Image: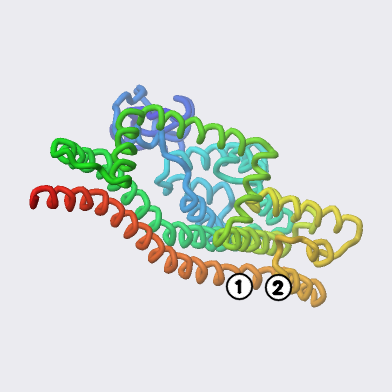
Amino acid sequence: MQTYSYKARDKNGKLITGTMEADSERELVNKLREQDCVVTVISEDMRFSLQDFSGSFKRVRQRDIILFTAQLASLSNSGMTLLASLRTLSGHTDNKKLRAIIEEVSKNIEGGSSLSEALSKHPKAFNGFFCSMVRAGEETGKLDTVLKSLSSFQECQLELIENVKSSLIYPIILILVSTAVIIFIVTSIIPTFVKMFKSASINLPLITTLLYNLGNFLINFWLILLFGISSAVFLIRFYISTPNGAYNADSFVLNMPFFGGLFRKLSVSRFARTFSMLVSSGVPILQSLIIVENVVGNKVIANDIRKAREAVSVGSSIYGSLKDSPHFPRDAVQMISAGEESGELEFMLNKVADFYDIDITYNLKRLVSLLEPFFLLVLGGVVIVIMASVLLPIFDMIKIIKR
């Protein structure tokens, strides 16, 4: 979309100047004609601004999608037409990339596409689950209700992810800062002391020699080390991008000590919440399982869901198809069974998700409370080793001086 400068006359003949975004000069003329203005001069606005430059690199954040969904639900519920709602949102959206997407979606709808079809052309902003939910709302005539539920669902998911990130940020910062300080000591301070000890003909203890050699290795071969680490990261990422690699990586994550159970609960919570949303919106069970399989976020659990879908397609219950899975907790499967028997599957699925969300938050806090003293003990041990590597030769030097 290009920005144009223009001069026009309003219905009273008054001269108006300004700028406006449009896909072409013809579209600009039509926009101004709708405002009872006659265009006299049009030129491309070549002014450069840092805001425009930075806007070209902006991505559509999850928070932007949540706000868009909630606002579209509110406008649709107020009685506004879909096109009018989208145009209103386009004018009030700060994210330029999302604004461009909304405008393109509006054009596709004007051309005869449904909202779900128009949104599906932008998979980076609106994933398959989002489009399926919108399609269900269109088919059932409850688009505003579905959009409102979808907004609440996305907000819950974002809040859970933010809780995980905020809980892990302190240990990560502690590890990074501690590593940087240790590298600085080993490469800068230890070599200075070693030179002093060698000039005094002091025999270096084993621990001092090891740290000194480690520092020399980092100083002399840091480029090779960096290349090796970069190559390893590249190879791991490449392996994970393959189907077998992705499956094995997700299996490794689920079997990690301490963290494996947490990631398993995250995946089960996402499964339950998403499945509940789809079922309550009128999406058929088999279609819902296909969508959940693609958005659950773990290949191992997705494989279990695929097997469950195959079992359901030949007449099995959801409980019967999941009860033998080693990755779905027994309590979650039992709650799903109760929901099927009582005819309140979506309600029980929501209860499963709520239960695991609370459990995840509690376990994160407990994990962080355990990690903090563990890292402090490790750092304390490292500090003792470094101090010993310096103090032991100093004691030897004092003995020599006393002689």
Left or right: 198 as drawn, with respect to 293: left
- Badges 1 and 2: C-beta atoms under 8 Å apart? yes
> What is the x, y in percent for residue 91?
43, 45
Q: Is residue 323 left or right of residue 77?
A: right
Q: Which mark is residue 355?
A: 1
Q: Is residue 218 left or right of residue 190?
A: right
> Label 2 is placed on what type of residue?
Asp
Q: Residue at x 19, y 42 (%)?
A: 202
98 relative to 275, above or below: above
Amino acid identity at mark 1: Phe
Circle 2 crowding by C-alpha within 10 Å: few under 14, some 14–19, many from 20 = few
Per the image, the residue denoted by label 2 is 331
Q: Position of residue 63 (x, y in %)?
A: 47, 53
Q: Is residue 268 above or below residue 294?
A: below
Q: Is residue 367 above or below residue 16?
A: below
Q: Residue at x 47, y 26 (%)?
A: 24
Is the N terminus in the top left, top right, bottom left or bottom right quadrant?
Answer: top left
Say which label, 1 or 2, has the lower sequence index. 2
| Position of residue 130 measured from the top left corner of the image (x, y, whole percent) | 62, 51
In the image: residue 242, left or right of residue 345? left
Which of the two marks, 1 or 2, is nearer to us in this view?
Answer: 2
Between the C-alphas of marks 1 and 2, the distance is: 10 Å
Task: Let me know if residue 160 appears in the view.
Answer: yes
Q: Pick the residue in front: 199 or 164.
A: 199
